[in-house]
Image: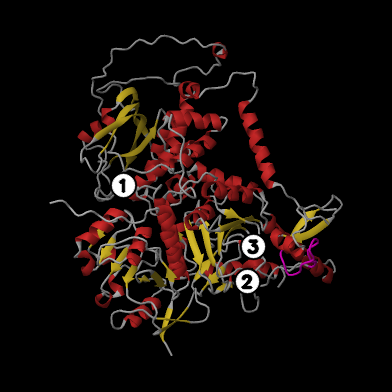
Amino acid sequence: MKPPAISPAFHDVSRQSQAVFRAIMQAMAQPGRTGLLDTGFETPAPLAPGAAAILLTLADFETPLWLDATLSASPATTDYLRFHTGASLVSDPQSAAFALIADAERAPPLTAFSQGTPDYPDRSTTLVFQVGSLDGQDWRLAGPGIKGETVFGVSPLPAGFMQQLQENNACAPLGVDVLFASQTRIAAIPRSTRIMEAR
Amino acid sequence: MYVAVKGGEAAIEAAHKLLAKERRGDASVLELTTDQIREQLSLAVNRVMSEGSLYDPDLAALAIKQARGDLIEAIFLARAYRTTLPRFGYSEPANTSAMAIRRRISATYKDLPGGQVLGPTFDYTHRLLDPSLAGEGNFPAVEKTETGDAEVSPHVAALLNNEGLIEENLPQNPDADVSDLTRGALEFPADRDLRLQALARGDEGFLLALGYSTQLGFGRTHPFAGEIRMGEVEVSFVPEELGFEVPLGEVTLTECEMVTQFAGSADAAPQFTRGYGLVFGHSERKAMAMALVDRSLRTAEFGEDVVAPAQDAEFVLSHADNIQATGFVEHLKLPHYVDFQAELVLLRQLRAEWEAERGKTDGASPKEAAE
Amino acid sequence: MSSAPVYNFAYLDEQTKRMIRRAILKAIAVPGYQVPFASREMPMPYGWGTGGVQLTASILGAGDVLKVIDQGADDTTNAVSIRKFFEKTAGVETTSLTGDATIIQTRHRIPEEPLTADQILVYQVPIPEPLRFLEPRETETRQMHALQDYGLMHVKLYEDISRHGHIATTYAYPVKVEARYVMDPSPIPKFDNPKMDMCSALQLFGAGREQRIYALPPYTQVTSLDFEDHPFERTKFEKPCGLCGATGVYLDEIVTDDQGGRLFVCSDTDYCEGRRGHETDGGVL
C-alpha cells in the first residue's frame, strides 16, 4: 500500500519561522496577550495549524516531543511532525522538551512533565495546548511582562487548571511554561506569571 | 572648536585596504600560491586544521595566506567557515590500529611488532640554519624502505594490556552519545570525551605549557611516551538511509599514548594508566602535550587530589580555546569610554573625599579608611 | 577547492536559530537566569559582540529596523561593523534614530530616550556571571544561584563601603531581578541601571564566548543591589552636555588639549543630535 503523502508545511522556512517565533516570543514576554500566528498551510487532523506552526518553528532533532493520546493515535499527525521537525517522539513526559496536547480537557497534570532542576531550571518541558478560544476573562495575571494586571482566559481546559498554574508559579524558577494556540492565535503563561481569579 | 568624531565606516574601509596591501607585501616579489603553502608550510597547515577542527588542507592554506601567516587568525577563519557547514552526522570511530604508518616510535620498548619507524622528523636534525634553502632548495631522493606496509603495528598499550599491566581504555558511558562542544554549551563536570575534544581543538602553546608544568612537579604523573604514531587513517560514515559504513576518505592523524604510573587503591591493583592525544595532520608536539594534560585531568578519576592547574578541568577547558582567548584579550581594544568615564567620576570623588578628610585631620597621622 | 559559500538570511543556519530561539524563550520565562546555549563561532571575534549578534540574527525579520550602538554611539567602529554585517547578510533597514528602531543592539549603554513596548533591546555581554569576580568557578556560582546564596556579593559591596564610604562599583553594577536572581546588567554605567526597571521594552542579553543568554521581559522589577543605610546612587554629572545642553544624561569626557581642557558631551549621540535638530552631521560647537 502506498503511504499517504505528507502535506507541506512552511514554504519559506526562514521567513515564516521567524515570524512565528516573534509571535511566540512576544506571547511569552507579555503573558496573557494574544498574537497572530502565520498559518498559511494545512495540517492533518487532529493537529491544528496554530500548534503546528509553533512546533515547526521550535522543534527539531534536539528536542524530544511528547504527544497526547489523541495526537499519537493519528499516524497522519505523527508522520507529519516527524517528517517536518525531525523530533523524536517520546512516551515519557519527563523526557520531553515539548509536549503537544490536543485534548486539553484530558491533559495530564503539569507536574507530570519535566520541571527543570535548581541548577538548570531551563531544562523543563514547554507545553503547547491546542485550544478553541483565547478570549476568556476568567483570570487576572500579574508578574514580569505585565504592566499591572491583565485579564485572560482559555477554553477548553481541565478542571482546576488555574490552581495547577498557581502551583507551577509557586515553584518558580522551576516549573513548565505553557503556550496556548487556537487555530491562528497564540498566548502564553510562563512559570513567572501569577494567576488569580478574575474579580 | 570641537567636532564630534565621525567616520567610523570610512576608517574601516581604509583599514581593510591597507591590510590587503600589507598582506601582499612588496609587489615585485612573486605572490605565494596556496599550493605552495599547502605543500611547503605543511606543519602550519596541519596546525590550522587541527585547532580549526576542519580537515581541509586547501582551505587551511588559503586561511594562512589570508591571515598573513598569523596562525591563530587562520584558525579563526577556518572555524568561522566550519560553523556554517551543514552537519550530516558523526563518523565511525577512526581505527588508528589500521593506520598506514609513516612514523611510529615508542620510548618504552627497544623493539616491538611493527618496529620503530623514525619517519620525517626534526628530532635528530642539528638546528643549524641551512643557507642552501635560501635559494632553490635541493632535496634528496627518497628510496622506499623495506619495512612493512603489510606488517601489523599493534598499539603499545595493547601489548601491556595483554598482561593486565595497564588500565583498560573503556568509554565512560558506552551507551551515551558522544559529547560535542560545538553543539552544546561546555558544562562541568566534563566527561573525558568532551575533555578530549576540547584539548584537540585547544591551543598548542597553552597545552604545551600545561603539559610541561606536569613534568616539573605541578601534578606530576611520571609519563613515558608509550607510543607516537603518524600516518593515514580511513574515515567512514554510516548514512541513516543506507545503514552500512561508507568510506569518506583518508585523513592524516598523529596519535600519542602516554603511559603513566598509578599506585592503585583499595579497589584497584597498581597498574599503568593512560593519557591520550589525537590530532589532525602531523602535529606531534600537540599530540604529546594533549596526552599529558588528558592524564592530568583524570586525577579525580583515580582518587588523587587536584593540586595543580593542569589537573583542574574547569581551569584547563575554560582557557584552552585560542579563538575565545584571543577574542576576549583583544576586545580590550574596543572603546570603553563609558565604563572608563564611570571610573573617572568615582576616582575623582574618592580623591576629593580623601583630600577633605586629610584636611580635617590637619595632616596628622594618616586617617584610616573613611568610616 | 570548495565552492564559494552561500549564507542563510541573517547568517545563521535555521537549526542554530531554533536552538537560540529556544534559549531565548527559557530566558524570558525565568527572568535573570542565565540559560546555557551552544554559541556558534561567528565571523567576528569572541568578546566583540558575538552573543548580541547571535541574538539579533535569531530574532531579526525582513520588516525590522535595526540600530546598533557601542558606547552610546552609532558611529563607533564596532557598531559600524556589526550594522554592516546585518545590512549585508539580512538586507534589513538600519537607522541611528532610537525612536525608529524595532531592534537596538547595544554595547555598554541604554539609550536616553525611553524605549517602547514595540522595541527590543539586545545587549552584548562579555561576562554574564555577576559572581564571577568573586568566585571564578562556574560549578560554584551555579550552586549559589540555585540556592539564592548571594552572601558573597553583599560582603563585597559592604567591604567597598567600609573602605571607601560607598559602593565602589560604577559599571556592570549588579541587579536583582524580581527578588530572585542576581544578574549582571553588562558593563553599562550604573547611571543606566534604573532604566532597566519596569522598562517597556523586552531586553535580551547575549554572551557568545560564555555561551549564555538571559532576559528581562517588559515591566520586570530590576533592583540595583544596595543597603538601607547606603542606598544605590546614580552617577551625577556637574555640568550639562557641552553640545546640546542636556542635563541628567550620561556624558563622555573629551580631552580637548594637553592643558587640562575637557569637554563633556552626551554619550548617546542620537539623543544629542536630536536635541540639536539633526542639523549638522558632525556636531560642531
Q: Main secondary structure of the magenta part?
A: loop
- Which quadrant holds residue A123? bottom left
The residue tagged 3 is C98
Task: Please say whether residue C243 is one of the residues in the magenta stretch.
Answer: yes
Judge whether residue B216 can be spotted in this image.
Answer: no
Q: Is residue C165 left or right of residue B144?
A: right
Q: In which quarter of the image is the C terminus of chain B?
A: bottom right
Q: How many marks?
A: 3
Out of C231 and B84, give the one closest to the viewer. Answer: B84
Q: Residue at x 23, y 20 (%)?
A: B151
Callout 1, which amino acid? Val
Q: Which amino acid does label 3 sit on?
A: Thr
* CA distance for labels 1 and 2: 45 Å
Q: Residue at x 40, y 79 (%)?
A: A135
* Disc 2 from disc 3: Cα separation: 18 Å
Spot occupied by residue A102 in the image (x, y as percentages of width and height) = 27, 70
Q: Are marks 1 and 2 in contact (CB under 8 Å)?
A: no
Q: Distance between the residues labelled 3 and 1?
A: 46 Å
| Earlier-in-chain disc, 2 versus 3 | 3
Kindly indicate whether the residues beneath marks 3 and 1 are on one polypeptide chain: no
Of marks 1 and 2, the one in the foreground: 2
The label number, if any, that marks residue B178 in the structure image: 1
Q: Name the residue under label 2.
A: C194
Disc 3, SS: helix
**Which secondary structure, mark 1?**
loop
Q: Which chain carries label 1?
A: B
Q: What element carries label 2?
A: helix
Numbered range of the magenta stretch = C238-250
